[in-house]
């Protein structure tokens, strides 16, 4: 028997589809055992890959790690084990840039198994009774607050990890995808985005600065207070019947001045450790997990949020998830891609704390941006 081990992230969307995919893989590969451990969502975004490659053959990974992985030789270069024709088939099926984000320095380091970006969530049943329309742009969002009945609230995911993603999204929506140049965030663009966040924080649920998307979606699905959240990472789980008490619907987030830029790209890639003792078999599995047939069927049916375009456009999957895929596809296709250079993840983790603390203490946006860019230079 060949024993392999992987690390997923600790949410049903993160591990259940991989466990189901592993069972399907074993039917045609009976001598391969794959065991999965989990880590928190914060650890998924922040833990260095260096801490994982000794223990795990498979690593679920956030795409900004590509530069660090490439620099330090941490991950298997999949093109050394997978024929180029198969990689081209995969690339042709993947949604938006979900393939390209795992390609760094002409090396392909992870197969896209999960697609995500900041989207909007809402309670369709509650909204219908108010007579309000969903905001399509940021000006309409500001007007939405004034019209909202007092028993309802709007929630933002503004814990440190998510305030960072929202900040970058607003910057990209205002200025376009090139607001970061030479390890410097355009100060004027950043100040404007921070001022916007401060405004929205004063008009949203008071717990917003503590919440991540999972906490908001759970509350939206089980209680009747939060009617809308304009920027959070979508989870198909909450759009499925009986996952929570009520179904949460999803749609594209409000747009800014740059209407061809949506929000920040998230998602998950499945990588193989450079220290894996069975690289060919491991590479076969990560391709299998990303294949259209698995993504459309086993992966999605078991709580997954696929990266396959075929899976997103599949009618049965949209019925299952109340049009989650159809209604947010445009966001994924126009998503902003974060930098991937070595050191970005260190900047991302601590930069998020700088912004979050600055907002909590009501520090001026100019000072927050000064501190942020000075720290960026020091990386």
Image (cartoon, rainbow, N blue to C red):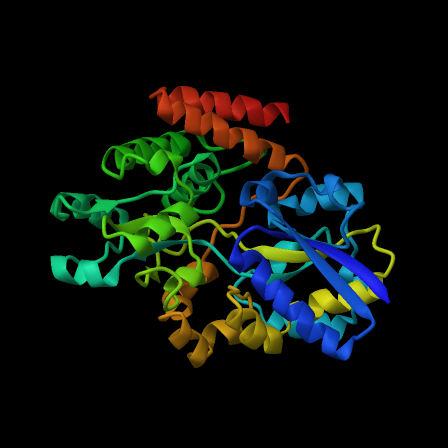
Depicted 84 relative to depicted 107: above or below: below
Report the label total: 0
Where residue 150 appears, as percent x and y from the top left, is: 13, 44
Depicted 316 relative to depicted 129: above or below: below
Q: Is residue 254 visible?
A: no
Residue at 55% over, 29% down: 350
Where residue 304 appears, as percent x and y from the top left, is: 53, 65
Q: Is residue 349 visible?
A: yes
Q: Quick check: 156 left or right of 379?
A: left
Locate the C terminus and report the quarter of the image it occupies: top right
Residue at 41% over, 32% down: 190
The answer to which quarter of the image holds residue 25 is bottom right
Locate the N terminus and report the quarter of the image it occupies: bottom right
Depicted 48 relative to depicted 33: above or below: above
Q: Quick check: 111 left or right of 327?
A: right
The answer to which quarter of the image holds residue 362 is top left
Q: Quick check: 353 left or right of 32?
A: left
Q: 366 or 152, which lies in front?
A: 152
Q: 282 or 196, which lies in front?
A: 282
Residue at 52% over, 58% down: 12
Where residue 201 appears, as percent x and y from the top left, is: 29, 34
Depicted 265 relative to depicted 294: above or below: above
Residue at 68% over, 68% down: 22
The answer to which quarter of the image holds residue 282 is bottom right
Q: 85 or 31, which lies in front?
A: 31
């Amino acid at each position: 028997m060949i024993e392999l081990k992987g690390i997923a992230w600790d949410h049903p969307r993160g591990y259940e589809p991989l466990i189901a995919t592993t069972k399907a893989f074993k039917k045609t590969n009976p001598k391969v055992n794959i065991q999965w451990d989990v880590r928190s969502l914060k650890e998924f975004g922040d833990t260095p890959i260096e801490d994982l490659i000794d223990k795990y053959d498979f690593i679920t990974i956030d795409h900004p790690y590509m530069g660090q992985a490439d620099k330090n030789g941490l991950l298997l270069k999949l093109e050394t084990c997978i024929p180029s024709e198969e990689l081209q088939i995969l690339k042709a099926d993947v949604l938006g840039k979900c393939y390209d984000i795992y390609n760094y320095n002409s090396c392909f380091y992870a197969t896209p198994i999960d697609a995500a970006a900041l989207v909007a969530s809402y309670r369709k049943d509650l909204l219908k009774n108010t007579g309000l329309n969903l905001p399509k742009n940021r000006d309409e969002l500001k007007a939405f607050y004034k019209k909202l009945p007092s028993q309802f609230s709007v929630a933002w995911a503004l814990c440190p990890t998510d305030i960072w993603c929202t900040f970058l999204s607003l910057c990209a929506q205002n200025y376009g995808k090139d607001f970061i140049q030479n390890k410097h965030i355009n100060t004027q663009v950043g100040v404007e985005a921070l001022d916007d966040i401060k405004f929205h924080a004063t008009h949203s649920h008071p717990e917003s600065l503590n919440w991540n998307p999972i906490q908001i979606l759970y509350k939206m699905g089980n209680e009747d207070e939060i009617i809308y959240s304009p920027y959070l990472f979508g989870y198909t789980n909450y759009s499925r019947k009986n996952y929570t008490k009520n179904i949460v619907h999803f749609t594209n987030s409000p747009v800014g001045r740059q209407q061809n830029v949506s929000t920040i790209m998230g998602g998950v890639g499945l990588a193989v450790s450079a220290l894996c003792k069975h690289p060919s078999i491991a590479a076969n599995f990560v391709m299998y997990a990303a294949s259209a047939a698995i993504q459309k069927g086993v992966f999605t049916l078991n709580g997954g949020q696929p990266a396959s375009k075929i899976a997103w456009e599949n009618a049965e999957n949209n019925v299952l998830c109340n049009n989650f895929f159809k209604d947010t596809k445009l966001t994924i296709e126009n998503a902003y891609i974060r930098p991937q250079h070595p050191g970005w993840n260190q900047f991302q983790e601590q930069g998020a704390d700088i912004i979050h603390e600055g907002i909590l203490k009501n520090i001026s946006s100019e000072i927050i941006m000064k501190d942020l860019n000075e720290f960026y230079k020091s990386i």
